[in-house]
Structures are given as C-alpha cells and as structure tokens.
Amino acid sequence: MLPGVPERQSFDYLRHGTTSLFAALEVATGQVISAVKRRVDPRNSSGSCAPSTTMCPPSRTSTSWGDNLATHTTPAVKTWLLKHPRCHPHFTPTGSSWLNLVERFFAEITVKLLRRGVHPSVTALERDIRDWIQQWNTNPWPYIWTRTADQILDSLAAHCRRTNHSGH
C-alpha cells in the first residue's frame, strides 16, 4: 500500500464463515476474558454476565456493561441472573456503544488482527482470535478517557447545534 492509493480487494474474495466474539474487559487493568461462539443464541449467551463474575471476588458484586444484543435479554438470561444475584448487568443505550470500553478493545482487535487478515477457515480465525487475546493479556493496559464527562457532553452539544442548524 502506498500513501494516497486506495486499498484494493481482489474479485475472488472468499468468506469462509463467521464467528462471534464475546468479551469482558476489566476496566482497571485492561485484562480481557472472552468466548468465541459460532452461533449467537440463548443457549450460549445465557449468563452473559458470567465472564465478569469470574473476575470479581465472591465477596463483591459484579457490575457489567453490555450492548443491546437481543440474546442478552432472553428468558434464559433473566433466569440465569435470578440465580446469580451478585451480577448486575447494565446496557448501553442504542447508538451509544462508544460508552462501553470493551468496544474500544473490539476496535483494537479489528485493526490489529482481523482487517486485512488471512484466515483460511473459521477454525483458523477462532484460533487466531484466542491467540491474539492471550498475547494481549500478557501485558494488558487499561483504556483511559482523555476528556472529562463535561468536555464530552459539551462537544456532543456543539455537534448537535451544528447539525440541527446547518441550514440544510
């Protein structure tokens, strides 16, 4: 690739299948625990808070943030949560995934592993993801907000004023 030259993709690109990555990020340390699943359904997402409970000492409650994936609120998940009262899940509002720091981790793995990666099979892709996360966890680092909440809200308000009164 050269500066100013668009990325090219061959006409014979072949997708070998898909997989889903579920992850819990310990905000204080950057440590990640994950699960790679071929199917996203209530059978493998019940207990979506389970990874975070393993990171939290039994004497404390486990607070987790998640997206609004439909399988996170199924009856199976609700039943699991009733059996695990120390788990307190919260869900980010639709369109606000930027609030969830694990999304920053997903961006990191996308840029450094998945985009432009060559994975000849789903099995190879899953192995590469697990290996990458294992390597990440050998020297994790936390994501740190560089702006205060007030600065972020001011920036958002300014954006809304610009787009709502743009004259179009």
Image: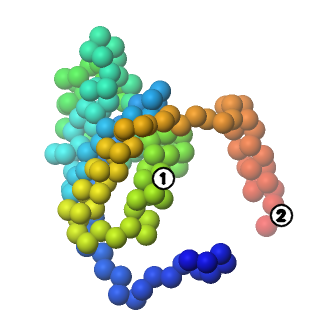
Residue 50 position within the rendered picture, expressed as x and y whole percent measured from the top left? 25, 32
Q: Nearer the viewer, mark 2 or mark 1?
A: 1
Q: Amino acid at mark 1?
A: Ala
Q: Is residue 5 above or below residue 154?
A: below
Q: Amino acid at mark 2?
A: Gly
In the rendered structure, which disc, 2 or 1, sits on the residue that comes first in sequence? 1
Q: Which residue is mark 1?
A: 107
Dot label at residue 119: none
Kindly indicate the quadrant of the structure image that contains residue 66. top left
Disc 1 crowd rating (10 Å Cα; few below 14, some 14-19, many 20+) is few
Residue 54 position within the rendered picture, expressed as x and y whole percent measured from the top left? 26, 26
Kindly indicate the quadrant of the structure image that contains residue 46. top left
Disc 2 crowd rating (10 Å Cα; few below 14, some 14-19, many 20+) is few
Q: Is residue 124 above or below residue 134?
A: below
What SS does tag 2 mark?
Answer: loop
* Quadrant showing the C terminus: bottom right
On the rendered structure, is 77 left or right of 138? Answer: left
On the rendered structure, is 79 left or right of 154? Answer: left
Residue 38 position within the rendered picture, expressed as x and y whole percent measured from the top left? 21, 57
**Label 2 vs label 1: CA separation?**
34 Å
Do we see residue 154 in this rendering?
yes
Q: Is residue 84 above or below residue 92?
A: above
Q: Which residue is mark 2?
A: 167
* Quadrant showing the N terminus: bottom right
Q: Nearer the viewer, residue 12 or 138?
A: 138
Scheme by which the image is coloured: rainbow
